[in-house]
Amino acid sequence: MQVFIIDPSAKEIKALDIPETQEALAQAIGFTTIDSDEIDDNGDRLFFDEECFIRLQSNVGRFKVDSLAPVAGVGIIVNSPDDGKTLQSAIVNLADLEKRVTFL
């Protein structure tokens, strides 16, 4: 599936092809403690390390999508119409997503 990886350390967003599994998502984020927030009505969600603010990490960077709470570390945009149970390619396009992400 095609997803978008948000890397706040590099301040970039890029497309990435990964398998449609929770394991692949965790590997791309770098942690197994994953949570997600809905970013729009079409099922696209931001997946991120649930413990991103309690981990002692240096130089990870932060970002936010629209008015969601800021996230530290890598985030992944994936489409999941059932709150993370199934994963599929993101619907949002890269140009529109770049307008919605703020690096902090």
Image: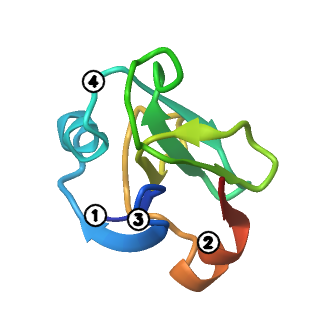
Task: Name the residue at 19% across, 35% down.
Answer: 23
Given contact means CB atoms under 8 Å apart, are the residues at marks 4 and 2 in contact?
A: no
Separation of marks 3 and 1 at Cα, in angstroms = 23 Å
Q: Earlier in the sequence, mark 4 or mark 3?
A: 3
Q: Amino acid at mark 4?
A: Thr
Q: Residue at x 25, y 37 (%)?
A: 30
Tell me the CA gap for discs 2 and 1.
17 Å
Task: Name the residue rendered at 41%, 18% in the picture.
Answer: 55
Task: Tell whether 41 sits left or right of 61.
Answer: right
Circle 4 packing at 10 Å, graded few (<14), some (14-19), many (20+), is some
On the rendered image, what quadrant is the N terminus found in?
bottom left
Residue under numbered circle 4: 32
Identify the element where label 2 is drawn: helix
Q: Nearer the viewer, mark 1 or mark 4?
A: 4
What is the distance, in whole Å, between disc 2 and disc 3 at their CAs? Answer: 16 Å
User: Foreground: 85 or 56?
Assistant: 56
Is residue 48 shown left or right of residue 101? left
Which residue is nearer to you in this view: 98 or 25? 98
Residue 10, label in figure: 3
Residue annotated with mark 1: 1
Indicate the position of residue 56 as horizontal and vertical percent values. Answer: 39, 19
Q: Which residue, given by chain and number where applicable, does mark 2 sit on?
A: 97
> Which amino acid does the dot numbered 2 rest on?
Leu
Which mark's residue is nearer the viewer, 2 or 3? 3
In this rendering, the label closer to the viewer, 2 or 1: 2
Q: CB atoms at circles 1 and 4 under 8 Å apart?
A: no
Dot 3 or dot 1, earlier in sequence: 1
The numbered mark, 2 or 1, whose residue comes first in the sequence reads 1
